[in-house]
Image (cartoon, rainbow, N blue to C red):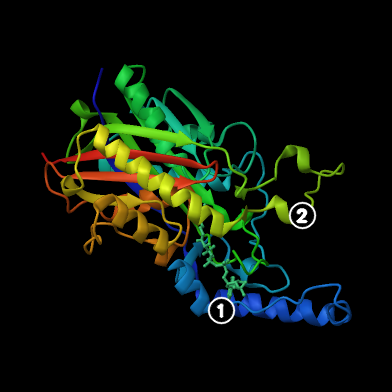
């Protein structure tokens, strides 16, 4: 058995972001037009009017202040309310691959690793822009990486499940180095015309290099252990897929073809599941709450993270102990906890302990216990 370590991480951040005010102005304009266009049905009581969204609600309910997106103009155009991401020719790099390669190159640079020395690329994300060939194989080729590559999807938990898969391969000796990459174009599977969720998601890509700890060239994080769990639920669901296309190949414009959730139920059911999962994982590894120096949580909702942090630590987390990035990035699905890890881990001291934890649709929850090693 070999010991695995995260030796590098990287984040690709899109160039454009949308503030809550911009988002709400576009939504309210769309709602006004919808209500005017359907005035007769609304006054006859056969159709519900669309109420306005509000920045105050969004900040209070989620903690989100803005989000990065791959295309701002389509999202903010009240007549579109969807990103304009034109399909690319088959011989051009796909959008997910392009975003993923940027994050991978940053992670490789931090690790001091050549792409050619990578044995496996796992593209772990909550949605893939095509079925096959795997995006991971395209990323492998664009990077000039060796070995093999495959896509995997466990929704918001994809990154931690990917880290567990890569770590197990490194431990067993079947590979020496892996890239786990999470390109998330959440803007394309979000229903921007739905007030209940239009503020939730953003786009980003993250990547980590995982290799044998003995190969690390600088400061790194030893992976002490990983743990994944799933439990079926329909409360976060997206029914899109190849069976859902119409005969002429067009996508149907059905609400269930985009992200759907029962947010309140998710709150109620996922919070205890996650708190218990982290606590049991730590206890089985002999880690007390007092031993924990950092929690890098999935970034869906500030209230959720405050609750989990308090449950796990048995007290209010101190500033910096449980960094949130969702105010700037919103929910970026599988990438959220890795953004937090990438941006808020350098300051940890030799011997410090941290936990990456992601959770979401499935339901699914994954945790990775890390120990900081400074050379
Ligand atoms: N602007 C203004 N008001 C809004 C609104 C908006 N954008 N969206 C909803 N509201 C209203 C609702 O209509 C509702 O009004 P009512 O009480 O008159 O019916 C009220 O605000 C509360 O809505 P609700 O949806 O119950 O809010 P919430 O407090 O549960 O917060 C979420 C909504 C989605 C932020 C929250 O449920 C959440 O984050 N859940 C977990 C999400 C999660 O982790 N999902 C995993 C995804 S991977």
Can residue 99 be seen here? The reply is no
In the foreground, 206 or 104: 206
Task: State the image coordinates of residue 24 (x, y, percent, origin top left).
Answer: 58, 77
164 sits to left or right of 232: left
Residue lying at 48% horizontally and 65% vertically, measured from the top left: 67
65 sits to left or right of 108: right
Task: State the image coordinates of residue 170 (x, y, percent, origin top left).
Answer: 32, 23
Question: Can you tell which quarter of the image residue 304 is in?
Answer: bottom left
In the foreground, 287 or 140: 287
Task: Give the residue number, with chain letter if any, for mark 1.
Answer: 54
For the C terminus, give its image quadrant.
top left
Classify 114 as above or below 299: above
Residue lying at 87% horizontally and 41% vertically, measured from the top left: 247
Residue lying at 56% horizontally and 48% vertically, measured from the top left: 95
Residue lying at 20% horizontally and 51% vertically, measured from the top left: 346
| Discs 2, 1 touching: Cβ within 8 Å | no
Tell me the number on the disc at residue 76.
none
Mark pair 2, 1: CA separation: 25 Å
Q: Residues within 10 Å of mark 1 (few under 14, many from 20)?
A: some
């Amino acid at each position: 058995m070999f010991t695995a370590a995260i030796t590098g991480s990287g984040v690709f951040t899109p160039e454009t972001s949308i503030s809550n005010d911009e988002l709400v102005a576009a939504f309210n304009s769309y709602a006004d037009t919808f209500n005017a266009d359907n005035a007769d049905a609304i006054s006859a009581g056969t159709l519900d009017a669309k109420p306005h969204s509000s920045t105050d609600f969004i900040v209070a309910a989620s903690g989100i202040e803005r989000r990065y997106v791959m295309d701002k103009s389509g999202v903010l155009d009240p007549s579109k309310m969807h990103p304009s991401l034109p399909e690319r020719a088959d011989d051009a790099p796909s959008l997910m691959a392009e975003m993923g390669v940027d994050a991978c190159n940053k992670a490789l640079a931090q690790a001091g690793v050549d792409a050619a020395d990578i044995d496996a690329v796992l593209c772990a994300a909550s949605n893939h822009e095509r079925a096959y060939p795997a995006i991971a194989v395209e990323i492998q080729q664009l990077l000039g990486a060796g070995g093999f590559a495959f896509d995997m999807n466990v929704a918001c938990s994809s990154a931690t499940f990917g880290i567990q898969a890569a770590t197990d391969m490194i431990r067993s000796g079947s590979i020496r180095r892996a890239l786990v990459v999470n390109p998330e174009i959440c803007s394309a599977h979000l229903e921007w015309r739905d007030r209940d969720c239009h503020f939730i998601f953003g786009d980003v890509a993250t990547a980590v290099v995982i290799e044998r700890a003995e190969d690390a060239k600088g400061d790194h994080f030893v992976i002490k252990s990983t743990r994944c769990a799933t439990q079926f639920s329909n409360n976060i669901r997206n029914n899109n897929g190849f069976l859902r296309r119409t005969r002429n190949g067009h996508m149907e414009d059905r609400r269930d073809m985009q992200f759907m959730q029962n947010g309140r139920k998710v709150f109620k059911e996922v919070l205890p599941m996650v708190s218990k999962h982290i606590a049991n994982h730590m206890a089985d590894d002999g880690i007390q709450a007092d031993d924990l120096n950092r929690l890098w949580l999935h970034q869906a909702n500030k209230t959720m993270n405050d609750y989990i942090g308090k449950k796990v630590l048995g007290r209010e987390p101190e500033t910096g102990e449980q960094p949130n990035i969702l105010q700037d990035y919103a929910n970026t699905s599988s990438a959220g906890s890795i953004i937090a890890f990438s941006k808020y881990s350098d300051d940890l001291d030799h011997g410090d302990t941290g936990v990456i934890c992601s959770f979401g649709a499935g339901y699914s929850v994954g945790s990775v216990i890390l120990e900081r090693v400074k050379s």
